[in-house]
């Protein structure tokens, strides 16, 4: 009699274990499918939260800039299903920023490449030639800033075209980049901090910010920032802004 009870108890446990395991696995899959995002909108503006995935749906709340949200999924027409006050609501995915990780090795390769393109301008060139050289690593809008702040006209070629070269100004320059110091020993020598890497995706486009602070008396705690973006995974990274 006791033996039969033991067998029945064991069978019951065996039958329950797969159910528990199945429930746990499903929960883990659901948790893994969510993403964390941050609201990225202009200062003073709020992001509307709606009851459905369209502008015609009712506004049920709002989110401030830099608000953290849990995203369950994104619809084909660009609406993110989020957790808002413990309910599933929708916001435009266009205004959400998804942070990612990037190794220093990868960031160094990207920065070294655009620095090399910039530094390949060693002579004087026409505007057409400069755009041809720099367009591989810089946006058109930033190339135009080079003309305004860091390039000057020295002479003309035999066809009468103006030739441009770097303006011999002291540090800090306006747009031109001096590069990032990656080597630890040189960072100590130059009183430079460890490069800060910020990598994220927004509205299907990838963005990268690499920044480095200098703390000696000459540079007075300035920070060099290099902003890059690319349209998709197959595109090349291009610098769209710099600052000191």
Image: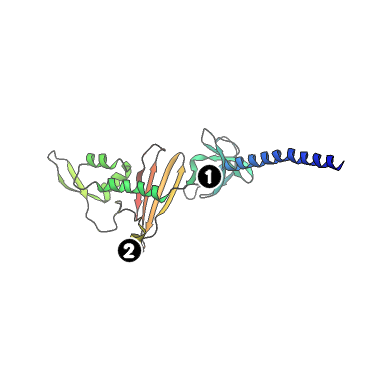
Q: Quadrant of the C terminus?
A: bottom left
Indicate which disc, 2 or 1, sits on the residue closer to the N terminus.
Answer: 1
- Percent across and percent down for residue 158 are 12, 40
Residue identified by numbered label 1: 47
Front-lying residue, 189 or 78: 189
Q: Position of residue 153 (x, y in %)?
A: 19, 48
Rendered-image quadrant of the N terminus: top right
Name the residue located 46 percent from the left edge and 43 percent from the top edge.
201
Residue 238: percent from left, percent from top: 35, 43
Q: Residues within 10 Å of mark 1 (few under 14, many from 20)?
A: some
Residue at the far left in the pictured view: 158
Return the residue nearer the eye: 198 or 103. 103
The colour style of the image is rainbow
Mark 2 lies on a secondary structure that is: helix
Q: Is residue 195 left or right of residue 121?
A: right
Residue 159 as seen in the image, left or right of residue 221: left
Residue extending furthest toward the top:
76
Q: Residue at x 35, y 47 (%)?
A: 109
Where does label 2 land, which residue?
189
**Residue 8: x %, y % from top left:** 81, 39
Front position in the image: 230 or 7:
7
Query: Label 1's element?
Result: strand
């Amino acid at each position: 009699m006791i033996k039969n009870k033991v067998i029945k108890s064991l069978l019951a446990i065996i039958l329950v274990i797969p159910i528990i395991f199945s429930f746990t696995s499903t929960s883990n899959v659901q948790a893994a499918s969510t993403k964390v995002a941050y609201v990225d909108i202009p200062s003073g503006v709020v992001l509307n939260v709606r009851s459905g995935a369209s502008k015609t749906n009712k506004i049920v709340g709002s989110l401030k800039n830099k608000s953290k949200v849990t995203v369950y999924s994104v619809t084909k027409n660009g609406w993110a299903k989020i957790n808002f006050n413990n309910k599933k609501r929708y916001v435009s995915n266009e205004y959400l920023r998804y942070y990612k990780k990037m190794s220093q090795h990868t960031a160094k390769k990207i920065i070294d490449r655009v620095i090399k393109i910039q530094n390949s301008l060693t002579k004087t060139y026409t505007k057409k030639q400069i755009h041809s050289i720099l367009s591989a690593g810089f946006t058109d809008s930033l190339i135009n800033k080079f003309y305004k702040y860091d390039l000057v006209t020295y002479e003309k070629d035999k066809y009468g075209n103006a030739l441009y070269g770097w303006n011999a100004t002291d540090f800090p320059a306006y747009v031109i980049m001096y590069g990032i110091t990656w080597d630890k020993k040189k960072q100590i020598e130059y009183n430079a901090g460890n490069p800060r890497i910020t990598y994220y995706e927004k509205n299907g486009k990838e963005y990268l910010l690499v920044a480095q602070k200098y703390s000696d008396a000459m540079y007075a705690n300035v920070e060099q920032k290099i902003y890059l973006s690319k349209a998709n995974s197959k595109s090349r990274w291009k610098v769209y802004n710099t600052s000191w």
